[in-house]
Image (tube, grey):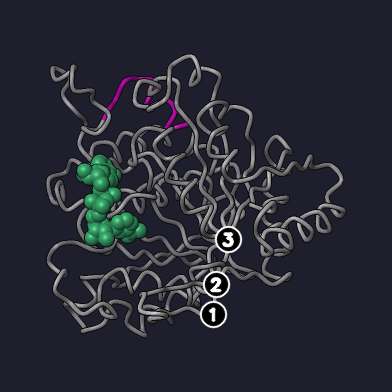
């Protein structure tokens, strides 16, 4: 029996998590998967109930689970809360507590939604289907020393970009393994022409590559990668990169894909559980109105089935159901173009129901 903890969170989090849970239950029934689930508190909802954005009880439940689903956290209601108790602090503590060091974000454009991409249509129609594998717990965001001061009458501040070889090796392994079930190409992105940390990155990625002879490895400087990502996105399969470069490139890639409502993600560590979440936030502007697009969450369930629950067939079924829904023309409000206001958008709940119907 596999156990999944759902953390609905704030804003549209509970709405999209509800549909994700419904889809997981439906696909489990269809494929005879023995999966139990329970809900726990995180974010602003947890702060309101317990005074903490990640109560100890929630972290303990998540650590014992096989996989964790997170809706979204945050919102204006908690703007005045001190930083360590903000909803977002709960999410950072969860990632740290679970030891998830790899963030996997698939970026694909559904042909029917190509108009929502910020790229020219002739570029989009070449087909975009890539996976960003971003290191999540190291790099300049966590490096020491860091600080600020005054020197010669001038204020200054500094951060440290640092990686050790094991941090690089384990994320490289994750990228090569992911590439094996895709088109078998990894492009490692760094700034080795300038940065020492990047030179070690490149060396260790090459050393690790020796164990993956069936995978094609290339290297690209991050400035060139940013350009190629918009000029020739179809040329990428797996992009492997550090925390800082991955942060920037994954948001750039999100704009290429179009709506935030379609982007799933998985964060993985050395051992279970993986953390699965949509790439978007709590969208306070549409919360409680049944307008949220639950497909990013439903696609995150597909990732969970494949990566943590060892149910690839069920994962394929969920992804096919999403594709057919889009092909059939069902659209939540975020996917209805400004110039097409005659279309009645599908609600969040109805979208979940339509996916469930296609899984039966
Ligand atoms: P956001 O992603 O919540 O919203 C950005 C825009 O996209 C909004 O117009 C929103 O309506 C729309 N949108 C987002 N998800 C959608 C969906 N599923 N369906 C339809 N439309 C969708 O980003 P924001 O407005 O910058 O942040 C709002 C709150 O969310 C903040 O408190 C922020 O800290 C938090 N946040 C949380 C996470 C997380 O939990 N992982 C990530 C980002 C932001």
| 118 part of magenta stretch | no
In this rendered view, identify the residue nearer to me: 101 or 242: 242
Q: Residues within 10 Å of mark 2 (few under 14, many from 20)?
A: some
The prevailing secondary structure element of the residues shown in magenta is helix
Sequence-wise, the earlier of marks 1 and 2 is 1
Taking the spot 40% from the left edge, 22% from the top edge, the residue there is 114
Residue 314: give its label.
none
The residue pinned by badge 1 equals 144
Sequence-wise, the earlier of marks 3 and 1 is 3
Q: CA distance from mark 1 to mark 2?
A: 6 Å
Q: Is 112 left, or right, of 289 in this rendering?
A: right
Taking the spot 21% from the left edge, 83% from the top edge, the residue there is 50
Instruction: Relative to 355, say whether 59 is above or below.
Output: below
Instruction: Relative to 65, say whether 193 is above or below.
Output: above
Instruction: Relative to 263, say whether 343 is above or below.
Output: above
Q: CA distance from mark 3 to mark 2?
A: 16 Å
Q: Please provide the residue range marked out in magenta.
A: 320-331
Locate the N terminus and report the quarter of the image it occupies.
bottom right
Taking the spot 34% from the left edge, 65% from the top edge, the residue there is 7
Residue 216: where, in percent of width, then height? 79, 39
Sequence-wise, the earlier of marks 3 and 2 is 3
Residue 135: give its label.
3
The residue pinned by badge 2 equals 160
Q: Please identify the quarter of the rendering in which residue 144 is found.
A: bottom right
Q: What is the secondary structure assignment of the residue under circle 3?
A: strand
Locate the C terminus and report the quarter of the image it occupies.
top left
The answer to whether the residue labelled 1 contacts the one labelled 2, judged by CB atoms less than 8 Å apart, is yes
In this rendered view, identify the residue nearer to me: 61 or 38: 61
Whether residue 281 is visible:
yes
């Amino acid at each position: 029996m596999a156990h999944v903890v759902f953390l609905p969170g704030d804003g549209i989090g509970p709405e999209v998590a509800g549909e994700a849970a419904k889809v997981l239950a439906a696909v489990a029934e269809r494929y005879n998967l023995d999966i139990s689930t329970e809900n726990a508190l995180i974010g602003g909802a947890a702060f309101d109930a317990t005074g903490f954005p990640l109560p100890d009880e929630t972290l303990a439940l998540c650590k014992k689970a096989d996989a964790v689903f997170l809706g979204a956290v945050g919102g204006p209601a908690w703007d005045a809360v001190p930083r360590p108790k903000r909803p977002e602090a709960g999410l950072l503590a969860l990632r740290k507590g679970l030891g998830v060091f790899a963030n996997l974000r698939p970026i694909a454009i559904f042909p029917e939604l190509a108009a929502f991409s910020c790229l020219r249509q002739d570029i989009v129609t070449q087909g975009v289907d890539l996976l960003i594998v971003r290191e999540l717990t190291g790099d300049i965001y966590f490096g020491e020393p860091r600080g600020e001061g005054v020197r010669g009458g001038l204020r200054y501040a500094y951060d440290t970009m640092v990686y050790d070889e094991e941090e690089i090796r384990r994320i490289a392994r994750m990228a090569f393994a992911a590439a094996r079930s895709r088109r078998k190409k990894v492009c490692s992105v760094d700034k080795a022409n300038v940065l020492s940390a990047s030179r070690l990155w490149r060396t260790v990625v090459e050393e690790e590559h020796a164990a993956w002879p069936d995978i094609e490895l290339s290297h690209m400087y991050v400035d060139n990668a940013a350009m190629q990502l918009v000029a020739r996105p179809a040329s990428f399969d797996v992009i492997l990169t550090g925390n800082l470069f991955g942060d920037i490139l994954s948001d750039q890639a999100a704009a290429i894909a179009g709506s935030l409502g379609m982007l799933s993600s998985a964060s993985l560590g050395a051992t279970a559980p993986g953390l699965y979440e949509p790439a978007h936030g709590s969208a306070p502007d549409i919360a409680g109105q049944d307008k949220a697009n639950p497909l990013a969450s439903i696609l995150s369930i597909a990732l969970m089935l494949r990566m943590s629950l060892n149910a690839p067939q069920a994962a394929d079924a969920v992804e096919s159901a999403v594709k057919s829904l889009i092909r059939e023309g069902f659209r939540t409000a975020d996917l209805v173009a400004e110039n097409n206001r005659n279309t009645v958008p599908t609600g969040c709940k109805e979208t979940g129901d339509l996916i469930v119907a296609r899984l039966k």
